[in-house]
Amino acid sequence: MTERRAYPSDLSDVRWALIEPVLSAWRAERRRYALNIGRPPEHDLREIMNAILYVDRTGVQWRCLPHDFPPWETCYGCLAKWQKDGVFAQLTGVLRRLLRQQEGKGAEPSVCVIDVQSVKTSTSVPAAGQGTDAATRIVGRKRSIVTDTLGLLLAVLVTAAGVQDSAVGTHLVDQVAAAHPTIRKVWVDGGYRRHLVGHAATLGIDMEITARTPGTNGFAPIPKRWAVERTYGWLMLHRRLARDYETLSARCEAMIHLAMTNLMARRLTGEATISWRTSTPKDQTLIPG
């Protein structure tokens, strides 16, 4: 492979070492059932992942990928296959467990937080996949995520913005209860209906609705739920997520998993994330995560 100049979004050697086993296992499994099993892979997995991270981090269109990456059709094709095969969710789970242990916590959480974010969509999103959020008046999609108390992703669901929070919350609580049986408590905001508390109780989960302190003016972190709000801030460092550009909601979920994989790998290796808000390279601020 011809050497090229590295982009800021590229994986370092130590971060690639965390991700490589999962991707290599996926490729080996695919090759077991391939007809052209004797043909060597044409493109390097690391370069494909670097290209996908480049899109997620910078927000460019797939067809605008720099030419020193593999062809955009190959990169997007791998994104689609990894999403369908659950590779991104697997990566998120592996890195989350490692990071929780590094922080001195158990590998599996006992408490989680649910929150929702409404975002505008681009013209590439079908009208049938959009809606209007009655609370924020945003026309687009909703991203609902579940995190642990460290703000690490447990589950994500992307829907039309008009879907009720309680309907999404029911699906997420079921998903979390099945995937993480150690969960015993979940914090949500006032947008979730009271009947969801009873549904969570049938799954052995205590749901607590938290809200802003009455009389509070301006921005103020909501007790117990600030961790998930911070996670949305981390995700916004990836420009592809500033607006929903994905035709399929499942692809948007994959981009969120990918962003979280990038953030957790950096935290595990002690590498800071460069903030794009600064004006000159000399003044760039490095932030955790």
Image: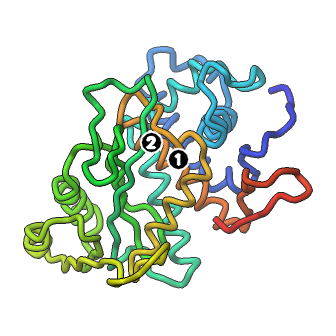
Q: Are marks 2 and 1 in contact (CB under 8 Å)?
A: yes
- Quadrant, the C terminus: bottom right
Residue at the farthest right position: 282
Distance of mark 2 from mark 1, alpha carbons?
Answer: 6 Å
Q: Which quarter of the figure is the N terminus placed in?
A: top right
Badge 2 amino acid: Ala
Identified at 33% across, 79% down, the residue is 110
Return the x and y of residue 143 as percentages of the image width and height.
37, 49
Please tell me how crowded label 2 is: few (under 14), some (14-19), or many (20+) other residues with Cα within 10 Å. Answer: many
Q: Nearer the viewer, residue 230 or 85?
A: 230
Q: Is residue 281 left or right of residue 117?
A: right
Question: Which of 153 and 34 lies nearest the eye of the viewer?
Answer: 153
* Residue carrying label 2: 254
Helix, strand or loop at disc 2? helix
Q: Which residue type carries mark 1?
A: Leu
Say left or right for 9 vs 251.
right
User: Quarter of the image holding residue 180?
Assistant: bottom left
Residue sitting at 56 percent across and 80 percent down?
Answer: 103
Q: Position of residue 120 (x, y in %)?
A: 42, 39
Q: In the image, is 65 to the left or to the right of 178?
A: right
- Residue in view at x 27 percent, y 75 percent: 186
Query: Which secondary structure, mark 1?
Result: helix
Residue at image location 39% in from the left, 81% down from the top = 224
- Colour setting: rainbow
Against 192, residue 109 (above or below) is: below
- Disc 1: which residue: 258
